[in-house]
């Protein structure tokens, strides 16, 4: 018995050792299977940032990789991200298998602190409800007319006088900042029925704009982490970028609450703005706040990004600028020669009518060409609910992030030919000089399928109003060194923005 009792500790230790060995093996296999340990060429370049030796922007590196891929699809294993520039795959995600590719909980987690339950971060019933409500407003002719009147007023009484006041003084003006302020004013009036000047805020409105930019940039930065636990731990500890993000989102939410407060104070029954319609159906101020933030993101950031990129490109292609001026004059004189001559003589010319804008086929094509090369939203991601196979044969495992890359898609020679990097509006015109739209899945700047952008026509109207009014009266001389002029650097964020802004000198046209 004594011998047996002496053997028990030995066998106990042996069992413990055996179990620990098995546990260690399983742990090692689990660790080895983690995507962040991938040592493939692409993942190594991503983790070490060695791609930056050859490219100024990560989107340009992705474009290079997608061009080199036979299927125009690549995998960033450390991010569990499949990225595609294949239009068949895009149609599959946005239309054919729409239900299998929602925004998904991982995406909602990344942007939840900023966008909450807003339409750009929602799926299911919440998304359907907001989309239905917004479509009732944005699709009506009365609201489009209302929006055009606001944009025209802002252009005539704020934007053009500002440019006129600095024209010829030789000073640099950051047009990116100007267009952001302009877009913020117009979206507040169109979507909320408020002038930003009436908001009772604790800080100047410019500080809240900066907070919005920071919140957008830091929220997008979360998606670049190899594991969500990295930013989640920083959020728990309230350190680093998460501490900055918390402060910025706090200011954004203060702005949203003030918008709701003022709209309620002024009354919302019978008003034409989008917020008033939502307030008639929703009593939850936190939900309304999320909706306000989503409208700000859509109306301020995307429109200003598009206009900024347009004038950046126009500075490089004077022949396009000349063609735009010729079309504006031809259409104005063609419809009313007397009025056209008057407009030429005015110091601050009247904003063109909505009918005039609709006739400008070349300008419309130039805006689309600008967004092909510089989409306001450079890429968009979904998460697969179930295992799937994309049309190009790519297997997608359940839970995988699948990204279609609008920036890269606009630069594919396979799609746009050898001149894919050139700014050529004529590629959008038919033989009669009329605008000929591309397949939405080949050009998914406005998304496609059930998630197609509801504000597309309103955004194009606003961009066209600004472009035509400025080009007609002013010459914009973008000030940048030759390297920047060839390859602009972008700031990471939910929408594209230029690092250093768009400094320019403003001159009146003769």
Image (cartoon, grey):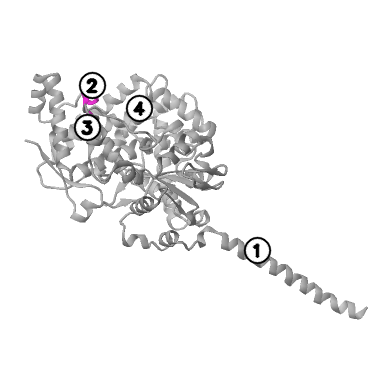
Which residue sits at x=40%, y=61%? 45
Disc on res. 355: 2
Indicate yes or no whether the magenta region holds residue 143.
no
Residue 46 percent coordinates (x, y): 41, 59
- Label 1, secondary structure: give it: helix
**Any mark on residue 26, and which?**
1
Q: Are marks 2 and 1 in contact (CB under 8 Å)?
A: no
- Give the labeled residue for mark 3: 363
* Quadrant where the N terminus is found in the figure: bottom right
Q: Which residue is mark 4?
A: 193
Q: Which quadrant of the rendered structure holds the C terminus?
A: top left
Which is more N-terminal, label 3 or label 2?
2
In screen coordinates, is 2 left or right of 112?
right
Which stretch appears magenta? 355-363
**Dots 2, 3 in contact, CB < 8 A:** no
**Mark 1 or mark 4, which has the lower sequence index?**
1
Give the Cα distance between marks 1 and 4. 60 Å
Frontmost of labels 1 and 4 is: 1
Q: Residue at x 18, y 32 (%)?
A: 469
- Mark toward the viewer: 2 or 3: 3
Is residue 194 visible in the rendered structure shown here? no
Residue 348 location (% of width, % of height): 13, 30
Earlier residue among tags 2 and 1: 1
**Residue at image x 88%, y 77%?**
5
Q: Is residue 301 visible?
A: yes
């Amino acid at each position: 018995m004594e011998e047996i009792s002496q053997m028990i500790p030995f066998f106990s230790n042996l069992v413990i050792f055996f179990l620990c060995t098995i546990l260690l093996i399983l742990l090692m296999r689990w660790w080895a299977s983690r995507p962040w340990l991938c040592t493939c060429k692409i993942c190594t370049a991503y983790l070490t940032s060695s791609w930056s030796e050859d490219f100024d922007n990560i989107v340009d590196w992705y474009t290079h990789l997608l061009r080199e891929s036979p299927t125009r699809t690549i995998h960033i294993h450390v991010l569990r991200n499949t990225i595609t520039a294949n239009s068949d795959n895009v149609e599959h995600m946005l239309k054919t298998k729409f239900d299998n590719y929602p925004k998904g909980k991982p995406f909602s987690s990344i942007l939840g602190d900023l966008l909450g339950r807003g339409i750009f971060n929602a799926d299911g019933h919440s998304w359907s409800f907001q989309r239905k409500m917004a479509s009732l407003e944005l699709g009506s002719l009365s609201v489009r007319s209302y929006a055009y009147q606001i944009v025209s007023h802002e252009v005539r009484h704020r934007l053009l006088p500002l440019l006129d006041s600095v024209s010829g003084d030789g000073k640099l003006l950051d047009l990116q900042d100007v267009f952001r302020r302009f877009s913020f004013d117009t979206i507040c009036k169109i979507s909320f029925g408020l002038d930003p000047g009436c908001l009772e805020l604790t800080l100047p409105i410019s500080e809240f704009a900066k907070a919005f930019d920071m919140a957008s940039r830091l929220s997008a930065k979360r998606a670049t982490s190899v594991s969500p636990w990295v930013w989640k731990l920083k959020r728990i500890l309230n350190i680093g970028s998460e501490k900055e993000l918390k402060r910025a989102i706090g200011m954004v939410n203060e702005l949203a609450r003030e918008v709701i407060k003022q709209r309620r104070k002024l009354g919302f029954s019978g008003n034409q703005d989008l917020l008033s319609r939502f307030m008639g159906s929703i009593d939850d101020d936190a939900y309304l706040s999320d909706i306000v933030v989503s409208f700000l993101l859509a109306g301020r950031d995307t429109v200003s990004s598009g206009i900024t990129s347009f004038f950046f490109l126009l500075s490089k292609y004077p022949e396009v600028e000349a063609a735009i001026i010729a079309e504006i004059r031809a259409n104005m004189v063609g419809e009313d020669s007397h009025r056209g001559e008057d407009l030429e003589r005015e110091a601050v010319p009247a904003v063109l009518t909505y009918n005039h804008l609709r006739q400008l086929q070349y300008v419309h094509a130039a805006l689309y060409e600008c967004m092909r090369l510089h989409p306001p939203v450079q890429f968009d991601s979904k998460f697969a609910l179930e295992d799937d196979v994309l049309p190009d044969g790519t297997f997608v495992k359940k839970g995988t992030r699948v990204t279609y890359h609008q920036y890269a898609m606009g630069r594919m020679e396979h799609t746009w030919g050898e001149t894919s990097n050139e700014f050529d509006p004529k590629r959008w015109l038919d033989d009669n000089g009329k605008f000929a739209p591309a397949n939405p899945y080949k050009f998914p700047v406005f998304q496609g399928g059930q998630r197609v952008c509801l504000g597309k026509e309103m955004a194009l109207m606003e961009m066209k109003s600004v472009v035509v009014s400025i080009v007609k009266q002013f010459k914009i001389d973008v000030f940048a060194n030759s390297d920047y002029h060839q390859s602009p650097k972008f700031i990471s964020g939910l929408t594209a923005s230029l690092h250093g802004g768009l400094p320019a000198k403003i001159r009146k046209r003769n």
